[in-house]
Image: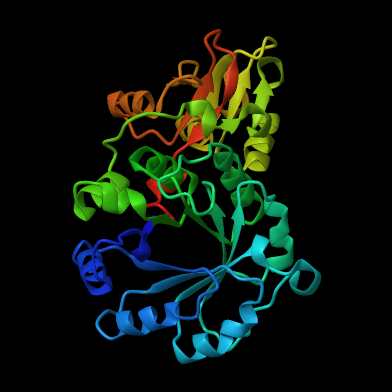
């Protein structure tokens, strides 16, 4: 996950000192907020005179078109337009000219449904504002974990950026959810140093505010079969339809009986090639999978992963009565964080 550093979050130093510090600590992007203020482009020109890091411009205005000539004169690498600020009678589904050769994104607040992206399908990414806009250092709204999962499922080819309330713990969850870029401002500059903050955003040494239930894939969205219907055909079809590489096996009380993955099936088939007719699904099921409770914290989750003697790709989530509640999928972390 890339880190886009919000340059205006440090008002105690000169622009050059701030940017030099960020460059030294190898941030990925420089985030520039433009609240309908053309003078921001003077700062972008100054940055371009001594730094070639990508510029990530967030344009908050009802009339983005008045900035197009400035953008042609002073190009940026990422351009995000704030959806709620647009004049919707005139600009619903606002089009950015093709000659602006930057990655294009639309920003939305927590209250705005992700379905508005249907009007921006030619854009490259969405920026989810996860705190109250303009509130520096605000707490990440956990409702956005669901929005991120929902957006990734609905628009798998589009990237997700997040701005607001991202600390070390939230960063881990966002990386796990496949977020491409996190904007960080006050967290970077109120830490003992920029380097210290970046280490926390990119490491797994973190505190805990959120529980597994905040960001798991809920059971309603998981591939599931019951113990009494676990034929090989049904199991394979459920895994294929679920598109996660596994399915959960539940009993009639919705308690977790086990888990079966595509890898489990392949292994069983290879080990029983001479007697496939007598091979049953029961012999492929892992009846004692590693699990995590829905009330466990992120730290608890990491302890479970570290205690495993094998790579963990997914963890079934259960409640205190061992009823299945969902799954935590680590595919984005394993792939190197999209």
Figure label count: 0
At a point 73% along the width and 65% down the height, the residue shown is: 119
Left or right: 190 in relation to 297:
left
Which quadrant holds the N terminus? bottom left
| Residue 79 in the image: above or below residue 137 | below
- Considering every residue shown, the one lying at the far front of the view is 12
Which quadrant holds the C terminus? bottom left
Who is closer to the viewer here, 17 or 96? 17
Name the spot of residue 2 as percent of width and height, x first.
37, 59
The answer to whether residue 279 of the structure is visible from this angle is: no
- Considering every residue shown, the one lying at the far right of the view is 89
Name the spot of residue 250 as percent of width and height, x first.
63, 17
Name the spot of residue 288 as percent of width and height, x first.
46, 16
Who is closer to the viewer here, 16 or 243? 16
Left or right: 23 in relation to 322:
left
Colour pattern of the rendering: rainbow
At a point 55% along the width and 85% down the height, the residue shown is: 100
At a point 32% along the width and 74% down the height, the residue shown is: 53
Who is closer to the viewer here, 32 or 308? 32
The answer to whether residue 243 of the structure is visible from this angle is: yes
| Residue 67 in the image: above or below residue 306 | below
Left or right: 112 in relation to 309:
right
Name the spot of residue 206 as percent of width and height, x first.
30, 35
Who is closer to the viewer here, 278 or 6? 6
| Residue 85 in the image: above or below residue 229 | below
């Amino acid at each position: 996950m890339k880190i886009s550093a919000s340059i205006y979050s440090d008002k105690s130093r000169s622009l050059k000192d701030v940017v030099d510090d960020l460059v030294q600590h190898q941030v990925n992007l420089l985030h520039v907020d433009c609240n309908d203020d053309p003078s921001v482009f003077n700062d972008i020109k100054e940055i371009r005179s001594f730094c070639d890091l990508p510029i990530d411009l967030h344009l908050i205005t009802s009339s983005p078109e008045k900035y197009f000539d400035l953008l042609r004169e002073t190009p940026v690498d990422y351009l995000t337009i704030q959806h709620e600020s647009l004049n919707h009678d005139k600009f619903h589904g606002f089009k950015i000219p093709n000659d602006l050769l930057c990655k294009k994104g639309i920003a939305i607040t927590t209250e705005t449904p992700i379905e508005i992206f249907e009007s921006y399908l030619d854009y490259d990414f969405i920026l989810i504002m996860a705190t109250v806009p303009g509130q520096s250092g605000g707490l990440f709204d956990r409702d956005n974990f669901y929005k991120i999962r929902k957006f990734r499922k609905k628009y798998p080819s589009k990237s997700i950026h997040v701005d607001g309330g991202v600390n070390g713990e939230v960063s881990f969850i966002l990386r796990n959810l496949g977020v491409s870029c996190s904007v960080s401002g006050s967290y970077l500059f109120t830490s003992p140093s920029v380097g210290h903050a970046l280490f926390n955003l990119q490491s797994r040494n973190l505190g805990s505010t959120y529980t597994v239930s905040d960001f798991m894939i809920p059971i309603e969205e998981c591939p599931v079969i019951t113990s009494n219907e676990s034929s090989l055909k049904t199991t394979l079809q459920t895994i294929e339809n679920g598109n996660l590489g596994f399915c959960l096996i539940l009993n009639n009380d919705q308690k977790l009986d086990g888990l079966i993955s595509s890898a489990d099936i392949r292994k069983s088939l290879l080990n029983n090639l001479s007697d496939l007719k007598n091979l049953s699904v029961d012999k492929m099921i892992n009846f004692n999978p590693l699990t995590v409770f829905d009330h466990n914290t992120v730290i608890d989750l990491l302890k479970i992963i570290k205690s495993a003697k094998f790579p963990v790709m997914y963890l079934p989530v259960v409640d205190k009565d061992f009823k299945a509640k969902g799954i935590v999928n680590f595919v984005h972390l394993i792939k190197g964080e999209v």
